[in-house]
Amino acid sequence: MSNNLFEAVLNPTWKTLSNEMKEVVIQNVLRHFVNPILEVTKITPVSYHFGGIKTDTFEIVIDGIEYVFVPGQKKCILGWDRGLSGLSGLDCSEERQELRYALKRYCNQQLTSSLLTEEGFLNQDFSHIRLTTEYIDEKINRSTSPLREVNIPALLVEKKPQYVGMKYIGQYNVVSGQLMSHENQTDNLLERIHSLLVPEGQNHYFLQDYPTVARKAPLLIQQNHLNPDIFNCYVDDAISYSDVKREVERHGFGLLNEDEWEYCCGASCRRLFKWGNQLKRQFFQQNISPLWKENMFGLTIANAEFGSELIDDVSVTKGGWLEETHKAPIINLLPLSSYYRGEGIEDKEKELTPGYYCVRKVMRVDSNG
């Protein structure tokens, strides 16, 4: 295959191509790298702006799943060893109490690790610790990957991760009281969904504020961001890391490695988070917060509604659930850092906690692909 193609899918060459030439390149990528048994149904040119970075790329639907083309880049600097450097002293102190209480409210309303496991916070409470500059500096560096220079190939990346160990069974409409996917519908299931939406002893829907998310094993329901009368419904379907990996690798896909994940998250920018190093007052307001937005590549990655993401390395996970464990907001938000390292998987064959992890598919566009 021509070396010109492999050069064209890398920045800075990709940025210099005309829109027409970019489309030719994408067609060649799909022709040579996507398994012909998979159906490509849509190719859409898109532009994303996030954190001061703009990317002109393509969204591609393959077998009903949305992917984004992420241009590759050589000599990317990834990892973090700067501790507090470049961060706001106020964000790193205990003075940002409005953010701390906003996080408390978020954890009470949204999906968290403790809700999925139906027990108290998995993370230990460190709110009693005196947060010195030295403690925070060390905590940030210990929680992030080491500084390094790497080459990243061009990638076709699934836009949004999927919950691991949870089977999607359809959308529940609170107005009709029915699942839109009738094949999964039973009276018992509808009754269980109803009990999650309406607390015991409350008999009327009228003017009721429904929970954003509710969990009672084996059922999880999550309110649709676009329509509050619709809830996405899942049931437990536990699976091991090894089985997840085998399923992902069907038809030529794979898992992101740590370098690729960090690049896809923050585009190799020298800042702790994909949006920058500052924390805004309205950080937990969904309509304006970066915690729920697609990033500069159009990816939902290290976002608030998902937990630890599985990668092609069992020793670490990337991203993670938000829990209110420290008084300093910057530490509580570290799981959303582009360079954060979560705990790995101890046993590849053991079934994972349903919904605690997430996973996405990737296809590499390089000479080894």
Image (cartoon, rainbow, N blue to C red):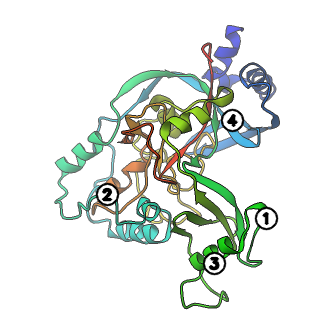
Badge 3, how many Cα within 10 Å: few under 14, some, many 20+? some
Q: Are marks 3 and 4 in contact (CB under 8 Å)?
A: no
Circle 2 packing at 10 Å, graded few (<14), some (14-19), many (20+), is few
x, y percent for residue 317: 42, 40
Which corner quadrant holds the N terminus?
top right
**Residue 56 shows which numbered tag?**
4
Given the image, on which type of amino acid does mark 3 rest? Answer: His
Q: Amino acid at mark 2?
A: Asn
Contact flag, marks 2 and 4 (Cβ < 8 Å)? no
Q: Quadrant of residue 8?
A: top right
Q: CA distance from mark 1 to mark 2?
A: 39 Å
Q: Is residue 353 in view?
A: yes
Query: Which residue, given by chain and number where applicable, does mark 3 sit on?
Result: 194
Pointer 1: residues within 10 angstroms few (<14), some, or many (20+)? few
Quick one: label 4, few (<14), some, or many (20+) residues within 10 Å?
A: some
Amino acid carrying label 4: it is Asp
Which mark sits nearer the N-terminus, 3 or 1? 1
Element class at badge 3: helix
Mark 2 vs mark 4: in front = 2
State the SS at label 1. Answer: helix
Q: Which residue is mark 2?
A: 123
Residue at figure coordinates x 68%, y 23% from the top left: 16
Residue 15 in the image: x percent, y percent? 66, 27
Q: Which residue is mark 1?
A: 182
